[in-house]
Each structure stands twice: as structure tokens, then as C-alpha cells.
Image (cartoon, rainbow, N blue to C red):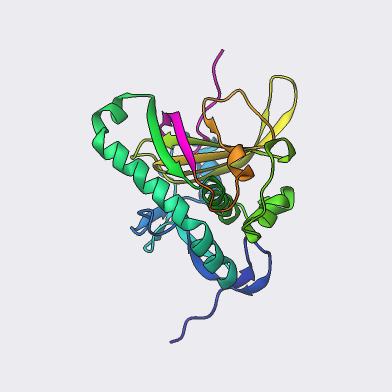
Amino acid sequence: MKKQPKLGNCAICGRYCELTFEHFPPKAAFNDKPTRIYSMDNILEKMQDSKKIPSSFEGVHYSNKQKGHGDFLLCSRCNNMTGHLYAPAYIELNNAMLGLIANNYEEYTLADKLVFKAKIKPLNFSKQVLSMFCCSYPNIKEQYPIIPELIMSKNKAINIEDCPFRLLMYLLTLDSIPGSTGPISLLMKDGRLDAKFEIDFPPFGFQLYDSGTNNNAIDVTNFLSYKYDETAELAAQIPIFKKNTIFPVSTLKTP
């Protein structure tokens, strides 16, 4: 029996059409193994049963994804575009980081940060990350219309002072639970409410904030100011966190 097409609005361009399966992160970034998906509905169901917010994923229902983490979310045009223009830069950096971890595994398991040097294509890489945020939170494009604009135009860049959000990056332990947490609102010390989105796919995790924060994570918003296919040297001490609860990774600096 022929499967019925999946119809809906593309998570990037918003067009109503037949949707294609999108791996996020890209399939070649070792996202080709069966994985468990915990949805907010599953977490709310657990909250109703226990009458409190669960502190971990234990006992929370999940769905199995045999193809890897992803879903029918993008039109074929956006799927092909991101896979061709941006995914290679993400795959290259992802696999370089996994190689570094493999060669320094003992240090990685004991340290709270890792020194990393690599040549990257910052704009290409960051646009792949933004496409992953769109897939995790399709409504994010309504809050930040600049995000689909950046993705759909490969040469479009933005200066950090003009960007309405901050994009942060950190490392995760390899046993961290992948997925998305949020969106949530944080009450900052100065009384502002700061929206926060998070996606965690070891070895990388990413957060997207409304504004700058006092944060241990690496601010990579300036990646969006480079030219398409422009190469730069990334040299940084990237902090390492463990994700094993339903709560966002706490990357804020403590007093």
C-alpha cells in the first residue's frame, strides 16, 4: 500500500506542500542510528501523573526514530538547499570534533572544557545550525523573521550589532541525551525576560538568546557576518556540559 504524503508547512520557508524527511543534525554527522524522541507532550503527560515537573527522562514515554533524529519538516527545495549549501560545513566540523575527542578521550571525560582548533566556514556552519533550530521550533521564524531570510539566501549575512539574537555553542558529553529544550523565558538579573531556545546533539549543543548573557558558552553570532564559503580559523576553549535532565543546560556563569 502506497504511503500517504506528509503535508504541512515547511519549517523554513513556510510553504504548504508535501514534506520530506529532514535529518537534524545532518545524517552524515553520525545521525543515522535509531534514537529516542521525547516530546513536550510526553513530558506534560508525566507531569500530570506525578503532579510535579520530572527532573529526568526516566519514566517519560518516547517514540523511536529508526532513521535517526529528524522528521517530515521541510519542502524538497529547502531540504536540498540546506543539504547542499550548509550541511557539509557542519559535518566537517562535527566529525573533526569527534576525532579530537577520540584522540583525547580521557582528558575529555575529566575536563570541563576542551581546546579546539580548526578551519571552518563560519557562515555555512551557522546557517545549518539555524536550519536545525527551525526544524526543532518551526514557529521560531515568526519571532525572528531574519532566520529564514538568512537560510534561504546563501550570500545573506548580518553584523552582530544588527542581529536580534545571540547564537551560543558548547560541547556535550557523548552520553548526553539529544533533543530540544524550550522555548523558555528567563528572568534576568536586570528584570528583563530573555527568550531562550536550545538544541543538543552531541558533541555540540547550541542556545539562542534574545540578547547577550553572562555565559560560559562560546558566542558564535559573529559567524553570521562572514561571506558564504569564506574560511576562518576557530581557536577556542569550548566548555563541556552533560545533558541528562529535561531542563536546559545551565551555561550561565555563577557569581
- Can residue 155 be seen here? The reply is yes
Q: Is residue 94 left or right of residue 151?
A: left
Q: Residue furthest top?
A: 255
- Do we see residue 245 in this rendering? no
Image quadrant where residue 14 sits: bottom right
**Split into 4 quadrants, where in the image is the C terminus?**
top right
Q: Which quarter of the rendered picture does the N terminus lie within?
A: bottom left
Magenta range is: 232-255
Residue at point 67% right, 72% down?
16
Which residue occupies 47% across, 59% down? 70
* Residue nearest the observer in this picture, 199 or 102: 102
**Which residue is found at the position 46% from the left and 45% from the top?**
120
Rendered position, 225 above or below 252: below
| Residue 167 forms part of the magenta stretch | no
Whether residue 159 sits left or right of residue 81 in the image: it is right
In the rendered image, the vertical position of residue 38 relative to residue 218, given as above or below: below
Image-based side of 1 in relation to 135, left or right = left
